[in-house]
Amino acid sequence: MSTASAAVGRRQVLPVYGAGFGAAFGAHAVAANLGAYALGRHDSLLELGLILGVYDAAEVVLKPVFGAVVDRRGRRR
């Protein structure tokens, strides 16, 4: 792979990196504030941990599945 084609490849994936950063930043901002919210409602830290665990597990399981579907079918118009 030449340097020019490597630069083009990097430019093509920059939007993907940006979207991933935005999604991760948003999810962690919500997670950081859930603790104060849960304790303000007098819920347990166990419930907070379960909520965060279910979210992370769903993300790990569903992202590859829906990524494969989009790769196969293409994006919507």
Image (cartoon, rainbow, N blue to C red):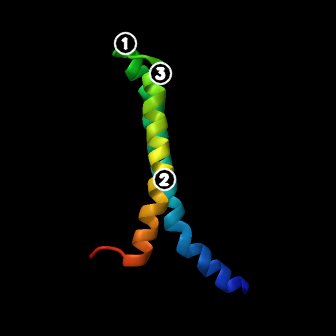
Q: Are marks 1 and 2 in contact (CB under 8 Å)?
A: no
Q: Secondary structure at mark 3?
A: helix
Residue under the image location 49 percent in, 61 percent down: 64
Query: Viewer-proximal residue, 45 or 39?
Result: 45
Q: Secondary structure at mark 2?
A: helix
Residue at which label 2 appears: 61
- Viewer can see residue 22: no
Near mark 2 (Cα within 10 A), the count class, few <14, some 14-19 or many ≥20, is: few
Alpha carbon distance from label 1 to label 2: 31 Å
Of the image marks 2 and 3, the number of the one nearer the N terminus = 3
* Residue found farthest to the top: 42
Q: Is residue 8 above or below residue 42?
A: below
How far is disc 2 from disc 3 in space, using C-alphas? 22 Å
User: Camera-side residue: 29 or 42?
Assistant: 42
Judge depth for marks 1 and 2 and give the one in front: 2
State the residue at coordinates (72%, 87%): 2
On the image, the x and y values in percent for residue 63 come to 46, 57
* Location of mark 1 (residue): 42
Within 10 Å of the Cα at label 3, are there few (<14), some (14-19), or many (20+) other Cα atoms?
A: few
What amino acid type should be assigned to the residue bearing mark 3? Answer: Leu
* Amino acid at pointer 1: His
Position of 68 relative to 42 (above/below): below
Q: Quadrant of the N terminus?
A: bottom right
Seen at 37% across and 15% down, the residue is 40
Q: Which mark is residue 32?
A: none
Residue 29: give x, y in percent of width and height.
Answer: 46, 37
Residue at the limit of the structure toward the left, as seen here: 77
Can you tell which mark lies on residue 46?
Answer: 3
**N-terminal-most mark, 1 or 2:** 1
Q: Is residue 8 above or below residue 54?
A: below
